[in-house]
Image (cartoon, grey):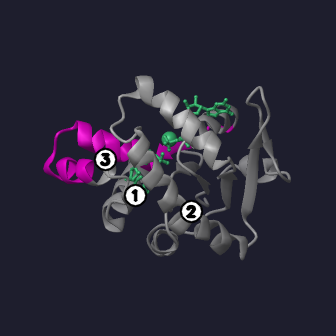
Amino acid sequence: GEMIVLLMSGGPGSGKGTQCEKIVAKYGYTHLSSGDLLRAEVASGSERGKQLQATMQKGELVPLDTVLEMIKEAMIAKADVSKGYLIDGYPREVKQGEEFEKKIGAPALLLYVDAKAETMVKRLMKRGETSGRADDNEETIKKRLDLYYKATEPVIAYYEKSGIVRKVSRNTDRNMLIQSNITSVLSLTP
Ligand SMILES: Nc1nc2c(ncn2[C@@H]2O[C@H](COP(=O)(O)OP(=O)(O)OP(=O)(O)O)[C@@H](O)[C@H]2O)c(=O)[nH]1
Ligand SMILES: Nc1ccn([C@@H]2O[C@H](COP(=O)(O)OP(=O)(O)O)[C@@H](O)[C@H]2O)c(=O)n1
Ligand SMILES: [Mg+2]
């Protein structure tokens, strides 16, 4: 049947990964974090991974084709068992969204985690104490944040035109509050 794709957007350290875990626990979607896929490629020590590492350490975007190809491969690998995909951290720019629609399909929803810049920086600095992530340092965090406002925020406006954007806000005990009801979409079975 129909393949369901949800996109999870938000700034660096906004809590995309954390919110995705909650959705997966509740609805059993396949979570694919583009950042995690890229970090796995770096960890593999491949030639492709070495090039990616340099880009990510600077807080810049890796080439569009590379990340889209990795997402597509990961989706195909899970196609038999997946009831839907939750794609975290992609698209990072409008062009990435356009290419996704051409090569894979149209998303059902774009979920968007809203957080203040100050909050994101604070969380990433804290996470950096233990994460071992080369990009969880003050200088790279600033670049990731700048790039988010410049390139990624316009993605939200782009999908707003099709009426599929749902904002996720979090209360203090980290429960997920999604503006307007998404249960009807999330509960669909393919
Ligand atoms: N206080 C608080 N901390 C949170 C919340 N959500 C996430 N965090 C913390 O903030 C940090 C970033 O959360 P992630 O879920 O890794 O954020 P992300 O958007 O996936 O960030 P990237 O991996 O950089 O893309 C982690 O250390 C989380 O534990 C929240 O609702 N409240
Ligand atoms: N679609 C993507 C996702 C991640 N990336 C790269 O991977 C890094 C980490 O991405 P991430 O999603 O794990 O983390 P945040 O930048 O959201 O904190 C980014 O800073 C980019 O260098 C990318 O280029 N394109
Ligand atoms: Mg993440």
- Whether disc 1's CB lies below 8 Å from ligand 2 is answered no
Q: Quadrant of residue 161?
A: bottom right
- Asked if 103 appears above or below 74 in the picture, the reply is below
Q: Residue 180: x and y, percent?
A: 86, 53
Residue type at tag 3: Gln
Q: Mark 3 or mark 1: which comes first in sequence?
A: 3
How packed is label 2: few (under 14 Cα within 10 Å), some, or many (20 or more)? few
Q: Which mark is residue 149?
A: 2
Q: Are marks 3 and 2 in contact (CB under 8 Å)?
A: no
Towards the viewer: 81 or 31: 31
Q: Residue 150: x and y, percent?
A: 53, 67
Q: Judging from the image, what secondary structure is the residue with disc 1 in? A: helix
The span picked out in magenta is 27-54
The residues bearing labels 1 and 2 have C-alpha atoms spaced at a distance of 26 Å
- Asked if 65 appears above or below 179 in the picture, the reply is below
Quarter containing the N terminus: bottom right
Q: Is residue 29 left or right of residue 177?
A: left
Which residue in the structure is indicated by mark 1?
72
Q: Judging from the image, what secondary structure is the residue with disc 3 in? A: helix
Q: Judging from the image, what secondary structure is the residue with disc 2 in? A: helix
The kind of secondary structure the magenta stretch mainly shows is: helix
Q: Residue at x 53, y 42 (%)?
A: 31
Which residue in the structure is indicated by mark 3?
57
**Magenta stretch: includes residue 167:** no
Number of dots carrying numbers = 3
Residue type at tag 1: Lys
- Asked if 107 appears above or below 70 in the picture, the reply is below
Q: Mark 3 or mark 2: which comes first in sequence?
A: 3
